Image (tube, rainbow, N blue to C red):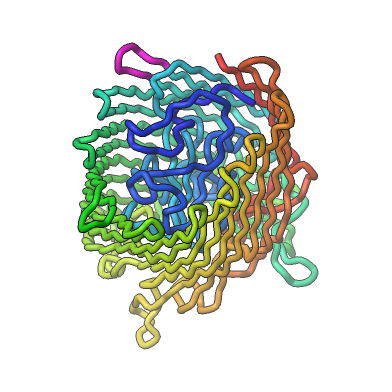
Amino acid sequence: MAAPAFAAEAAVEAAPVEDEIIVQGERSTYGAAKIVSATKTATAVQDIPQALTIVTKAQIDDQQLRSISELLTFVPGASPATGESNRDQMTLRGNNSTADFFVDGLRDDVQYFRDFYNVARVEVLKGPNAMIFGRGGGGGIVNRVAKRTGFDTARALDLGGDSFGGFRGTLDIDQPLGGALGLRVNALYEKGDSFRRDVELTRYGVNPTLGIALGDESRLDLSYEYFRDRRTTDRGVPSVTDPAGIDTPLTGHDRDFFGDADDSFARAGVHRLSAALEHRLTDSLSLRHRTVYGDYDKFYQNIYPTNLDEAAGEVVLGAYNSTNDRRSLISQTDLVWEGRLGGIDQTLLAGVELGHQSSRNRRLSGSFAGSNRVSLADPSVDKVVTYAAAPSDANNRTLATVAALYVQNQLRPTEWLEIVAGLRLDRFTLEVDDLRASGGEYERTDTLLSPRLGLVVKPFDNLSLYASYSRSFLPQSGDQFGGLDVTSEALKPERFDNLELGAKWQPIDGLLATAAIYRLDRTNTRATDPANPAKTVLSGAQRSTGIEFGLERSITHRWQVSAGYAWQKAEISETTTAAPEGREVPLVPRHSASLWSKYRLTDSFALGLGAVARSKSFASLSNQVKLPGYARLDAAAYYKLRRGVTAQLNVENLLGADYFPAAHNDNNIAPGPPRNAKLTLHLGL
């Protein structure tokens, strides 16, 4: 139905190099049979004892998904957040994060907006994942799998526009260079407008990857990415008290920018170099090594609503800017042995990870020349704002280093039983040089043990049942490690413990149905000591419980589907410094459901239909502002004009629903876009 697929997308099983299946064909595959990221070994999805969702490039293209936020809308148990309109931010199983993002299993935790122009698929793994990914990941992680050469000739150009005046173009070239060399080049340019007044976006990127086949048993991939993103930081609309006395998002201002759009912007520059080596040492032993160096420059500034004075009919504004420049160097080396020991089939993993991450953080608060209030009737203003450091504004240099050892065994005593057991030891050190007048030098070192245990029972070839336990940790400096002080320097990390039962069933060949029930406890959360209010103790806790259902891959060779439903409850179970016991975690609707389905009626024509529905949730931990529940309908049509050329029309929010899908706090709430048509032309060059 579209341009030819490339080997990196076709070989979605992510098996070792010599086992990869190289296929040329249509971009029609949803889901994956095997992945590496969940266990660091090529493991069938049905044998992984945890819930996960895989969104392939085929599905991303079919739905025209252009951001992490849009993708997470179609992932059971996931909720996107606005991230102050300057970064990707998400809530997985009731735990919020700006840092649990990875590329090919290596950390990509800087606060910016990612793109999918150079990915083969996106994997969302639920629950604590520290045994594989290290610190953080309490509710889950998002891993992007990058494209690489298939050592075959293929080219594709996609050009598109939308109802708001936006334009997007992507180029994908795979070119053999003779002998054992292949070059994959992906490029992007996008200039977008919004239904929100004066809100704009410009981003571009290029990612060449050189593949070197070092004989039949080895492969080396060298990659460099340059990516740039600049956009208006739109913090949304404030809340208002309705006649019934309930605080809800302000309506009637979906298109209005609150603040100064000209001086509210975010820019991110990314330089990312990586090297990946795969080598089969013997028939049973293989080596995999990855090293990545990232150079990130990030700045954002915003003038935004902090409150609505309903009696005066005025909006109160705030302002600040922030700089975060980061350099990171990370390497992972894995040895994987497959064979029989003691009469038991098993796959043994042993690995080491080393990391070094330096950051420069600076925040300046804004003060207004004159009043910081504007009329609700005309909230878009041009204000003179002066930025200077307030006593509480961050101004520091940080250095985070990690050294980790991990081991895992996947034992198969019989054909119907598999045991996955692993343990990771991290030594994590954070050094902070606080450059404020009241600051100083602080350091904290934690030694973290992260276990994982899973049991998979397969009563039938097409059915697996599993039970699992996993644990993760997060240092008290937060997921961005922005600073330490006298209090946090002395506190142990937060801890996440997850118990999960689940099932994975293939009712027909090519279709995977999943179910999971879980309980996730977050402990060692800060609280005020009742006996001494000046003292901080780690008695706070949060509990998330839920049930998730998923359906993905293909019903027939003409019919692809991705669907999910989640019931979730996440609340403060023991009082913390942020909220009392009983408060609900924000952006966690009790019910959420999504559907995307594409059916190819003829060899030249296909239709797609999608739906999203969510019950009400809270905008923040205050539980004062409710985001109303909503339902949205999407549709698409695909027509093959001639060989290698396909026209595609996607219409989001087909019925024009008025809704508020996400928020950052009680007065920074994002209105959902109205009906938006995206027209795309796929060219196989």
| Residue in the foreground of this view, choosing between 8 and 385 | 8
In which quarter of the view is residue 648 placed? top right
Instruction: Tell me: residue 291, above or below residue 174.
Output: below
| Residue in the foreground of this view, choosing between 576 and 608 | 608
In magenta, the rendered stretch is 175-183
Q: In screen coordinates, is 190 left or right of 399?
A: right
In which quarter of the view is residue 25 placed? top right
Is 266 a magenta residue?
no
Instruction: Tell me: residue 214, above or below residue 238.
Output: above
Q: In screen coordinates, is 233 left or right of 103?
A: right
| Residue in the foreground of this view, choosing between 273 and 86 | 273
| Residue 369 seen from this side | no
Percent position of residue 258, x then y = 65, 47
Tell me the quarter of the image containing the N terminus. Answer: top right
Q: Residue at x 42, y 18 (%)?
A: 152
| Residue 663 seen from this side | yes
Q: Residue at x 80, y 44 (%)?
A: 655
| Residue in the foreground of this view, choosing between 545 and 25 | 25
Percent position of residue 468, x then y = 40, 65
Is 181 a magenta residue?
yes
Tell me the quarter of the image containing the C terminus. Answer: top right
* The furthest residue to the top: 178
Q: Residue at x 36, y 34 (%)?
A: 19
Q: In screen coordinates, is 630 left or right of 153?
A: right
Instruction: Tell me: residue 659, above or below residue 684.
Output: below
Task: Name the magenta segment's main secondary structure.
Answer: strand
Percent position of residue 349, x then y = 25, 50
